[in-house]
Image (cartoon, grey):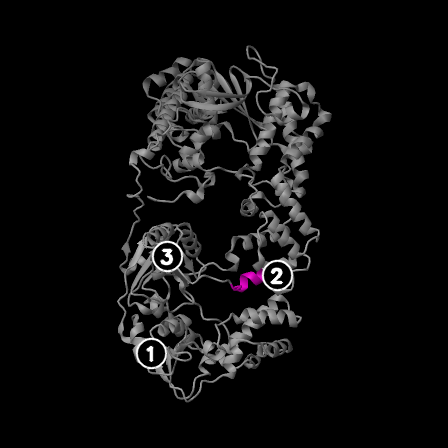
């Protein structure tokens, strides 16, 4: 099967111009034929059945019927909508208003009552039922198959039918492929101007993203258009409805959930507050919104009062169309309730409230209802499977006949205008776009996407050659990044592009960030003022935290959080009591250097360079903030997350085999401290202060269970394990067979192994055991001790202990390699910032760990 060629408008006119009356399926075709009349005439020449019968423009009957049933019966809003639509639809397809009663599921008293109301209404369906065209007139019917049974009922027995198709096939224009919806809109705007707007039509699915994009783009370019926005598309109408809905969402509604409402009302709270509870936010803008919602919840306001208050919020604007609709529905003077808001929302989403449009400019036509578009230049946007119309599942509908009717309409729609342009996407989000299913019936070839149909790929040139700007006049020299933090480095290694968007996109405050900061504030406060806090004041501290977390924490979760806060504070107090910082030469000031919640609550100053110590070490290109410098050789970091062992910390920072959960905090901070304390053994302690909550509740807590300590040794790893002390450690503290074997050997026997074979570059025990070094070690011990099974087992235990030493600590060569790694990343990063290449989605890893990506929706794959 192929696309049938539609007859040109001129040919249709020539075939019917001698008739007294021409009946057509749609009003645009009637108007186009009437414009071809060569001389004035009395009455209609071409018209639709409904206009012929009612003598007026067609109305949305479903809405009229719904309002009647709503006011005159006891039916609910949804019942009135459902029955009204079913009665009208059955009437349309059978020609009789009471035909629906012949179907068992509709043969009820309520339906019969509804039919009696509907049949007497002043609708075009009733006019069609009562009207028949004068048999004395010569009548031509164009597109008879497109008419419904009710529309055909007005035709005289003697009439002529004119087919809208020829015997030829339509030479379809090519599909023009674009990468994105934005590219399609740009291509459209490159053609449309205010001067040629009256010559252009755009056919699209009114429910697709293209509808809003086209309307906003044309509006931004001051290009007139019509046929687009409806009653609920008006932003104020939509916002008012959302505002009514928001009033019943409870006390836990988040700022981000109502951000579009707030922005339209001019209440700018900023993205930082997005995840906070609006009604618990201490801000004047939030209070104004909360008061509005509270009045609705108390039942103080009617719909009309609410609209008046909304008009006041909008600076005195008036929305009479919405007020009239509330009066039409009979709810204007009724108190606002959640159920009534549900009904109002259902109504506005179900029916198109009449809106006056200026009939000038670009014509926006809905692909699922239009067939004739009387414009010389027609753009078709999308043409995907959303253009397919599913025949309704109703007992009076012949689905095969209905499918054929829709298929004919689709063929006619594709051929409007003197020139047609099919603008489509081949993929969306990496998935292929399925063309409209009618193409399967019309094109004699198989396909799954538009590129299978011989489509042409297009790109949009966004360079403005007529803007008058020189290329260099807007050039901005990129700033060079001289240092990088541990969190930024971890993000960059996981996904350079995610790191890039972190610099561009603002993110809201998170509850876990705020909670973590409160614990850090307390730890800093306690270091300075341990005398201000005692165990019997713990609940007072918890109260401070609960109040600070109020915007984030639901009321139902408050006690759970109190338990968490109490446990975390107890651990921090215990740790700092047992590991009080060695002040030494560090300076403690008598003024507060930064905002601290507990310092404010207790009105005590904070100021020292041992807590929350920031550093910007340009010598080795790193920066950060150390929670506590317990001593010159011991750094402390407080963690609210789950505990990691020393081996997990070292593994996640390994450079030779990058982890998919990269974390360089301990490695970076120890590298900084080494530059200040060279040749010193250093420690980095993680305090996981929420790790043992269950034990605290049971009274079985052990502070040591919350600590993870990483040690840095100021010597290369191989040199460290070659030491006599390491040999003694293996001999005295190793596993049984290891102790038994090495106790019969000397340190010189151990040392000769390192001289005889090179220690491999590995972190895997099995790889070490199977290496030349491993074989040499075993052979040497067997020569010294004897060829016993326990000797081989003891050597393997010793080598596993050597790997444990490597994988739980840092050494000089680890930090040296890290400094080089940082310099390589910064060189690479600055080259990308300067435009040397795009920041890739993944680089050092095969793919990002998406659980650690903050901007997943911005990370397009491949070359995009």
Give whichever of discs 3 and 1 has the lower sequence position.
Answer: 1
How much space separates mark 3 and mark 1, taking CA atoms?
34 Å
Question: Could you tell me residue 280's position as x and y percent?
Answer: 64, 40
The question of residue 210 being in magenta is answered with no
Q: Nearer the viewer, residue 573 or 77?
A: 77
User: Tag 1: Cα neighbours inside 10 Å, few (<14), some, or many (≥20)?
Assistant: some
Give whichever of discs 3 and 2 has the lower sequence position.
Answer: 2
How much space separates mark 3 and mark 2, taking CA atoms?
41 Å
Q: Check disc 2 and report the residue beneath it.
A: 326
Q: Looking at the rendering, which quadrant does residue 504 occupy?
A: top left
Closer mark to the observer between disc 3 and disc 2: 2
Residue at point 48% right, 24% down?
A: 624
Magenta part of the chain: 345-354
Of the numbered discs in the image, which one, if any, rests on residue 163? Answer: 1
Q: Split into 4 quadrants, where in the image is the C terminus? A: top left
User: Tag 3: Cα neighbours inside 10 Å, few (<14), some, or many (≥20)?
Assistant: many
Of the numbered discs in the image, which one, if any, rests on residue 232? Answer: none
How much space separates mark 1 and mark 2, taking CA atoms?
46 Å
Dot 1 lies on which element? loop
Tell me whether circle 3 and circle 2 mark residues in contact (CB < 8 Å).
no
Q: Check disc 3 and report the residue beneath it.
A: 433
Q: Nearer the viewer, residue 750 or 47?
A: 47
In the rendered structure, the answer to whether residue 83 lies left or right of residue 380 reads right
Tell me whether circle 1 and circle 2 mark residues in contact (CB < 8 Å).
no
The question of residue 350 being in magenta is answered with yes
Tell me whether circle 3 and circle 1 mark residues in contact (CB < 8 Å).
no
Question: Could you tell me residue 328's position as x and y percent?
Answer: 61, 65
Closer mark to the observer between disc 3 and disc 1: 1
């Amino acid at each position: 099967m192929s696309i049938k060629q539609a007859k040109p408008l001129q040919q249709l006119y020539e075939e019917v111009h001698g008739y007294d009356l021409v009946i057509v399926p749609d009003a645009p075709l009637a108007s186009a034929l009437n414009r071809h009349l060569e001389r004035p005439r009395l009455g209609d020449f071409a018209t639709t059945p409904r206009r012929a019968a009612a003598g007026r423009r067609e109305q949305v009957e479903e809405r009229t019927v719904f309002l009647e049933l709503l006011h005159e019966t006891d039916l609910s809003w949804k019942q009135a909508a459902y029955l009204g639509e079913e009665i009208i639809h059955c009437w349309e397809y059978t020609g009789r208003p009471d035909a629906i009663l012949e179907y068992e599921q509709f043969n009820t008293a309520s339906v019969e009552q509804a039919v009696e109301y509907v049949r007497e209404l002043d609708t075009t369906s009733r006019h069609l039922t009562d009207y028949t065209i004068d048999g004395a007139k010569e009548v031509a019917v164009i597109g008879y198959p497109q008419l419904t049974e009710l529309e055909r009922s007005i035709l005289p027995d003697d009439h002529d039918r004119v087919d809208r198709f020829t015997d030829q096939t339509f030479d379809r224009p090519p599909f023009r492929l674009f990468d994105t919806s934005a590219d399609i809109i740009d291509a459209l705007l490159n053609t449309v101007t205010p001067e040629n707007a009256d010559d252009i039509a755009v056919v699209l699915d009114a429910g697709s993203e293209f509808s809003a994009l086209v309307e906003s783009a044309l509006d931004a370019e001051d290009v007139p258009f019509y046929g687009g926005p409806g009653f609920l598309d008006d932003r104020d109408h939509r916002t008012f409805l959302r505002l009514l809905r928001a009033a019943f969402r409870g006390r836990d509604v988040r700022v981000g959930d109502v951000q579009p409402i707030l922005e339209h009302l001019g209440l700018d709270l900023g993205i930082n507050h997005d995840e906070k509870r609006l009604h618990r936010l201490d801000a004047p803008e939030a209070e104004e919104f909360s008061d509005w919602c509270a009045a609705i919840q108390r039942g103080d306001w009617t719909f009309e009062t609410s609209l008046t208050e909304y008009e006041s919020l909008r600076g005195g604007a008036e929305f009479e169309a919405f007020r009239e609709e509330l009066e039409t529905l009979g709810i204007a003077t009724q108190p606002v309730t959640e159920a009534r808001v549900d009904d109002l929302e259902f109504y506005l989403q179900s029916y198109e409230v009449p809106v006056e449009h200026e009939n000038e400019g670009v014509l926006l036509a809905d692909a699922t209802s239009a067939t004739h578009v009387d414009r010389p230049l027609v753009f078709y946007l999308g043409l995907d499977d959303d253009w397919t119309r599913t025949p309704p599942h109703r007992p009076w509908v012949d689905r095969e006949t209905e499918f054929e009717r829709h298929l004919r309409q689709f063929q006619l729609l594709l051929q409007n205008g003197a020139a047609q342009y099919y603008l489509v996407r081949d993929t969306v989000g990496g998935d292929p776009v399925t063309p409209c299913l009618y193409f399967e019936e019309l094109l004699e070839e198989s396909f799954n996407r538009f590129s299978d149909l011989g489509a042409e790929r297009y790109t949009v040139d966004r360079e403005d050659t007529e803007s008058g700007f020189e290329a260099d006049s807007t050039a901005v020299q990129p700033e060079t990044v001289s240092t990088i933090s541990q969190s930024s480095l971890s993000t960059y290694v996981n996904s350079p592009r995610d790191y890039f968007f972190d610099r561009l996109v603002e993110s809201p405050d998170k509850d876990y960030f705020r909670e973590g900061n409160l614990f850090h504030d307390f730890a800093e406060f306690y270091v300075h003022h341990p005398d201000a806090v005692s165990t019997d004041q713990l609940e007072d501290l918890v109260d401070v935290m609960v109040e600070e977390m109020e915007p984030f924490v639901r009321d139902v979760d408050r006690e759970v959080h109190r338990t968490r806060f109490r446990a975390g504070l107890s651990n921090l107090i215990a740790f700092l009591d047992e590991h009080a910082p060695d002040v030494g030469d560090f300076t403690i000031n008598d003024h507060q250097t930064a905002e601290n919640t507990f310092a404010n609550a207790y009105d005590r100053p904070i100021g020292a360079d041992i807590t929350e110590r920031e550093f910007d070490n340009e010598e080795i290109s790193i920066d950060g903030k150390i929670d506590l410098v317990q001593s010159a050789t011991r750094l402390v970091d407080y963690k609210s997350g789950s505990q990691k062992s020393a081996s997990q910390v070292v593994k996640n920072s390994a450079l030779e085999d990058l982890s998919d959960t990269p974390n360089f905090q301990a490695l970076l901070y120890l590298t900084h401290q080494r530059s200040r304390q060279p040749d010193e053994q250093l420690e980095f302690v993680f305090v996981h202060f929420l790790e043992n909550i269950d034990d605290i509740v049971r009274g079985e807590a052990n502070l040591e269970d919350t600590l993870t300590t990483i040690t840095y040794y100021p010597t290369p790893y191989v040199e460290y394990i070659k030491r006599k002390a390491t040999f003694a450690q293996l001999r005295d503290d190793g596993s049984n067979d290891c102790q038994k074997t090495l106790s019969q050997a000397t340190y010189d026997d151990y040392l000769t192994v390192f001289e005889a074979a090179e220690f491999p570059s590995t972190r895997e025990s099995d790889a070490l055991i199977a290496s030349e070094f491993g074989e040499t070690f075993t052979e040497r011990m067997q020569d010294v001790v004897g060829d016993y099974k326990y000797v081989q087992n003891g050597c393997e235990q010793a080598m596993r202990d050597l790997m444990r030493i490597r994988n739980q600590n840092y050494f000089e060569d680890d930090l040296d390699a890290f400094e080089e790694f940082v310099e390589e990343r910064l060189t690479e990063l600055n080259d990308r910032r300067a435009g040397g290449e795009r920041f890739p989605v993944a680089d050092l890893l095969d793919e990002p760990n998406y659980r650690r990506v903050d901007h997943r929706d911005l990370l397009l794959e491949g070359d995009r």
